[in-house]
Amino acid sequence: MLPFRQVDVFSTEPLRGNPVAVVHDADGLTDDQMAAFARWTNLSETTFLLTPTDPGADYRLRIWTPGGELPFAGHPTLGSAHAWLEAGGAPAAADVVVQQCAAGLVEVRRGERLAFAGPPLVRSGLVDPADLAHAVRVLGLGDDDVVDAAWIDNGPGWMGLLLRDADAVLACRPDFGAFDDLKVGIVGPWPEGSECAVEVRAFCPGYGPEEDPVTGSLNAGIGAWLAGTRLPASYVAAQGTVLQRRGRVHVTREDDVVWVGGDTRTTVAGTVALGG
């Protein structure tokens, strides 16, 4: 039996964020056991806390979707850091937790809320017209809905589309059966003076739920792309609205680093049997 927590991430309201399943003390588990448990939870991500192999890390994390392993993901990073600290984890530095994952070392700042430093983009720049046309088609968008597009991939593979406004984001009705390997995030601005600066949605069928409720890695990519130019250097994004969630993602760009923060709370705690 291993210690287990399920943590709600990116909302101040209970059960309105994005849950992540976190298994502690997972060094003895095989890849097959991790993959099977991730399929069984059927959450967008399930994570496993392990002993670090890098001397600069406080812990090591493996991140799985029902469809396979990811090198990095945002809400699992915040939820796993929360679970590790709550279980008595003591970071080397009081104000920062350092996570080791397949994407490298990721810093998680401790303050009013946890915030991770978005990893560098592994793919950026303009989207090929054929790829953009495919994305527009499967999302059911009109050509006049899309203001800009870019690759904003910091590990999971995101393509980003900037739409004309938040209403266009909320009205989007994707054809999930036509996505192929596409992972796409859409973002649109709310009117000035609104509670949130933008509305965000994330679509990744084949890797987990067809639409992810609240997505840290995507918001980090959007921040790297738009913060300080088309968006303020610091802003709050809403996500999950159409799924009856109330995700709030706090994005701040400091020079070349994008910090993505969100509230975290444990909703389930106990033990889990993964032997076999």
Image (cartoon, rainbow, N blue to C red):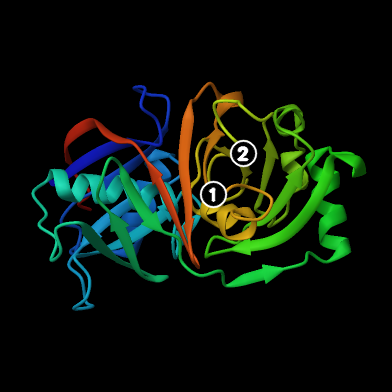
Residue under numbered circle 1: 219
Judge the density around disc 1: few (<14), some (14-19), many (≥20) Cα neighbours within 10 Å.
many
Q: Quadrant of residue 109?
A: bottom left
Label 2 Cα neighbours within 10 Å, binned few <14 / some 14-19 / many ≥20: many
In the image, residue 248 sits, relative to residue 36, either above or below, namely above
Q: Nearer the viewer, residue 27 or 264?
A: 264
- Secondary structure at numbered mark 2: strand
Q: Is residue 114 above or below residue 254?
A: above
Judged from this view, the residue extending furthest toward the right is 143
What residue is shown at x 39% (from left), y 30% (from top)? 11
Of labels 2 and 1, earlier in sequence is 2
Answer above or below: position of 227 versus 139: below
Using the image as rendered, state which of residue 224 and residue 25 is in the foreground. Answer: 224
Q: Secondary structure at mark 1?
A: helix
The image position of residue 249, as x and y in percent, is 47, 40
Residue 169 occupies which quadrant of the picture? top right
Query: Please, what is the three-letter code of the amino acid marked with disc 1?
Result: Asn
Q: Which mark is residue 200?
A: 2
Q: Tags 2 and 1 in contact by the CB under 8 Å rule?
A: yes
Question: Is residue 108 shown left or right of residue 207?
Answer: left
Position of residue 201 in the picture relative to residue 215 (left or right): right
Residue 134 percent coordinates (x, y): 84, 53
| Residue in view at x 83 percent, y 66 percent | 128
Q: Residue at image x 50%, y 68%?
A: 256
Left or right of residue 84: residue 61: right
Give the residue displayed 88% in from the left and 63% down from the top: 129
- Counting from the top left corner in percent of width and height, residue 218 is at 55, 51
Badge number at residue 105: none
Which amino acid lies under the numbered mark 2 shown in the image of this protein?
A: Val
Spatial distance from mark 2 to mark 1, Cα to Cα? 8 Å
Q: Disc count in the image?
A: 2
State the image quarter where residue 226 is shown.
bottom right
